[in-house]
Amino acid sequence: FAFPEDRRERRRSRWLALAIPVTAGLAVLALLGWVVGSTLGGLPIRDGASPSAEAATATAGGPSATTQPPLQAVRPQTATLYDPEGDQSEGSTIAQSYDRDPATSWRTDRYNSGRANTFGGLKDGIGIAYEFSTPTPLRQVTIATDQPGTSVQILAGSTLDAGMDGLMPVGERADLGRSTTITLRTGSARTYYVVWFTQLALVEGGYRGSLSEVTFRR
């Protein structure tokens, strides 16, 4: 005859005899899984990587990251005076505004009356329209001048035939220094970019503007 306590003890012993090997086996499997996972995690990413891996690469600055390409200087094909309200008499030296020689300059006439932004009471502004061979998305314009203190807008358009209504302001700067870089608002590519004077500099008892070298970058 066995006492209840003896039966309970025998059942506990049998349960331990089964549980210990099973627990040990599970621990071994878990250890193997951890080792394999760590090893695979250290391997280089190959084609067909998971979307999460690609996202991590992009976040870290990998090939999928959205980055701007380096700035590249681009030269206009030609340039013409842009003087919708004028007599077109100030365009004789326009080529000197982008001839890669800052010692040469295109200059406006000297306006002796009115204020810096009235152009002798004759017009609202004057500028040079630079034409590119194909529509070009520009990001920067650098203006060198020997008449600092002027103010300009950068206007962009696909044609000059519509006048000022066909041009869109994409950048501006007041009180230009001897060399000033203007960051343009990005958008659709345009064929024409106009450096448009809205205010001239006080010089020699009158008002004048000049462009010694205009450099465009895309």
Image (cartoon, rainbow, N blue to C red):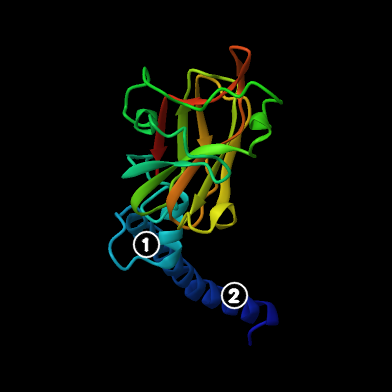
Residue lying at 61% horizontally and 24% vertically, measured from the top left: 111
Compare residues 103 and 7 and report the one nearer the observer: 103
Indicate the amino acid at tag 2.
Arg
Indicate the amino acid at tag 1.
Leu
Residue lying at 45% horizontally and 68% vertically, measured from the top left: 26
The reply to whether callout 2 and callout 1 are in contact (CB within 8 Å) is no
Estimate the x, y position of residue 13 in percent, counting from the top left: 55, 73
Residue lying at 46% horizontally and 36% vertically, measured from the top left: 141
Compare residues 6 and 130 and report the one nearer the observer: 130
Quadrant including the N terminus: bottom right
Q: Which residue is mark 1?
A: 32
Q: Is residue 148 above or below residue 67?
A: above
Residue 41, image quadrant: bottom left
Q: Which residue appears farthest toward the top when viewing the image? A: 204
**Count of marks overlaid on the render:** 2
Q: Which residue is mark 2?
A: 12
The secondary structure type at the circle numbered 2 is helix
Residue 71, image quadrant: top left
Residue lying at 68% horizontally and 77% vertically, measured from the top left: 5
**Nearer the camera: disc 2 or disc 1:** 1
